[in-house]
Image (cartoon, grey):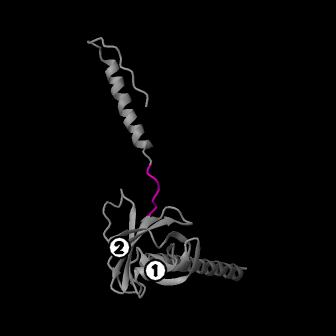
Amino acid sequence: MTTTRLRARDRAWVNLAAATALAGAMSLAVLGNAAAHAEHGHPARIHKGACESLQGVAYRLNGVGGSVDTEGAPVATPTAINPKTTYQVMVSDTVIDATIDDLLASDHAIMIYESDDAMEAIACGNVGGALSGDELIVGLGEARIPGHLGFALFTPDGDQTDVLVILGHAMAPVSASSGAANHEDEHDETDAHEASEPNHDEEAPHATPAP
């Protein structure tokens, strides 16, 4: 009986150890994937076709917000200023072997994806937009995952083109309701204070004009 109990207890410890090891491995895998995503950023591609009907990949761009390029070499990353009170802005800079005229000769679109593991579209823009001097400014609208907006700047560089992607993350609309409410509260407190004081001038109250 004692031997049976010991074996059962041993099996319990073995099962616990195995479960702990599995949980640790899964945690390491999650951390590894997160680190890889942070390193490579959001995948970016220039596709043939349009956002509504994408075709094959024409050019691979460096990941947006990544710290390495498509070859794994480190790239400079911008410094975040006032990150607690501002939207997160991510960038990607890549030189491609094509001119702006080459890209405009047929339909092309620039697509930003969530990650290498989850290739879900988060922002897209058809190549075109506003030409400022020799620089083409392309707008990027949110795709399946909302909250990502930005621009892609195409700048000629000889027979090549420098593509700078600027993407805002979690770009939710800013509501002025809270600020207006606070402003109204201030008015209410002021009005209450004035009402509590005696009116020496005995002036008739002024009507508030309708908005």
Give the number of the disc on residue 138: none
Q: Which mark is residue 135?
A: 2
Question: Does residue 36 appear anywhere in the picture?
Answer: no
Answer whether residue 132 is magenta in the image: no
Q: Tell me the kind of residue under disc 2.
A: Glu
**Badge 1, how many Cα within 10 Å: few under 14, some, many 20+?**
some
Mark carried by residue 103: 1
Of the image marks 1 and 2, the number of the one nearer the N terminus? 1
Q: Is residue 173 magenta?
A: yes
Q: Position of residue 152 (x, y in %)?
A: 41, 71
Q: Quadrant of residue 137?
A: bottom left
- Compute the Cα span from label 1 to label 2: 13 Å
Q: Nearest the camera: 191 or 144?
A: 144
Magenta stretch, residue numbers: 169-174
Quarter holding the C terminus is top left
The residue lying toward the viewer, choosing from 125 and 101, is 101
- Judged from the image, the secondary structure of the residue bearing numbered disc 2 is strand
Q: Nearer the viewer, residue 40 or 3?
A: 40
Q: Residues within 10 Å of mark 2 (few under 14, many from 20)?
A: some
Residue 50 in sight here: yes
Q: Is residue 68 above or below residue 83?
A: below
Mark 1 lies on a secondary structure that is helix
56 relative position to 68: left or right: right
